[in-house]
Amino acid sequence: MTAQAAIRVEALAKRFGSLQALDGIDLEVRCGEFFGLLGPNGAGKTTLISILAGLCRPDAGRATVMGHDVRTDYRNARRMLGVVPQEIVFDPFFSVRETLVIQSGYFGLRHNDAWIDEILEHLGLSSKAGANMRSLSGGMKRRVLVAQALVHRPPVIILDEPTAGVDVELRQSLWRFIRRLNEDGHTIVLTTHYLEEAEALCGRIAMMKGGRVIALDTTANLVGRMRDRVVVRLTLSAGALPPAMAARVVSSEGASHVLRLPDPAEVEPLLAQVREAGGQIAELSVTQPDLEEVFVQTMRGTLAGTQSA
């Protein structure tokens, strides 16, 4: 592991009764990264985030945020971190602006109005600044959670399912703002079940299962390790696929077939073989595997060689 790290986790373990939520994981997120933390429900992602945020204590191991131990140097570690939780939690007695002013006070920040105004504008909350939290829609409440996490300008920001159940407009405005923060040097850690978001945003990704990190690499490398890198979907209006292609066929339904190829250069020879055998192609699409397919194969244990520095 390198000396410079926004988040460093070493042999971290946590058990809840008979459940081993974290099983001695090691993980490093570098300063300035846009990092994805993916896994099915129960993989240990939320437990890891809770330990980093000081909400629960590990049974073993060590975790630091910007070099500050989350147990022995909690105050400074907490100042370095902003967390957008998955659950919508709010105080019903305050307006949006009052909520952010109070949040600023938790970190000893006075005269934070200019930054609060900027956050409200970028998250589309300016018109709701004086509204009581109880009157907001679910999507608006989630925007406030994002604003609360950013109000003390933390260098490390963890987004735990930030776009779950929100509309397209919020999703787009949120990512524009988060991208800008990342470009300004903030480290972003994202957990999401929207894998297309992770693929588009994250430079590196860790995949967790059963409290362990089972895959860790750049997004490009993870997708590039798929053995069959091209998916061909074709429907024939006449004829049939040559028998020699049977090994490439993943599924067939009537005249429609799905085939996998290891190299894009094999697409044209495949089509030539179909035509030579008398097949007439009515519909054709050629796609490459995406992160969702990598994730599924990794969870099944059918994609090897995904652990890397």
Image (cartoon, grey):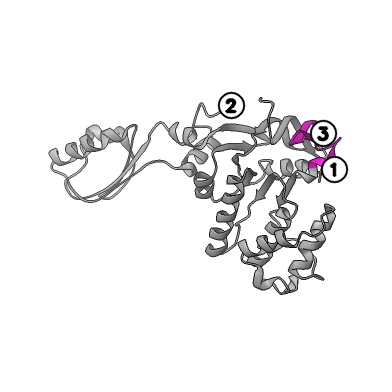
> Which one is in front in this view, the residue at disc 2 or the one at disc 3?
2
The front one of 64 and 261 is 64
The front one of 263 and 135 is 135
> Which one is in front in this view, the residue at disc 1 or the one at disc 3?
1
Up-down relation of residue 202 to residue 213 (above or below): below
Residue 218: which disc? none
Nearer-N-terminus badge (1/3): 3
Mark 2–mark 3 Cα distance, whole angstroms, equals 25 Å
* Label 3 sits on residue: 59
The front one of 103 and 53 is 103
- Image location of residue 39, percent across then percent down: 60, 42
Mark 1–mark 2 Cα distance, whole angstroms, equals 30 Å
Q: Which residues are magenta?
A: 60-77
Nearer-N-terminus badge (2/3): 3
Element on which disc 2 rests? loop
* Label 1 sits on residue: 75
280 sits to left or right of 63: left
The answer to whether residue 250 is magenta is no
The front one of 71 and 230 is 71
36 sits to left or right of 91: left
Mark 1–mark 3 Cα distance, whole angstroms, equals 20 Å
Up-down relation of residue 9 to residue 105 (above or below): above
Q: Residue at x 66, y 32 (%)?
A: 28
Q: Residue at x 80, y 36 (%)?
A: 58
For the residue marked with disc 2, what is the amino acid? Ala
- Image location of residue 8, percent across then percent down: 71, 32
> Which one is in front in this view, the residue at disc 1 or the one at disc 2?
1
* Label 2 sits on residue: 309
Element on which disc 3 rests? loop
Q: Residue at x 82, y 52 (%)?
A: 107
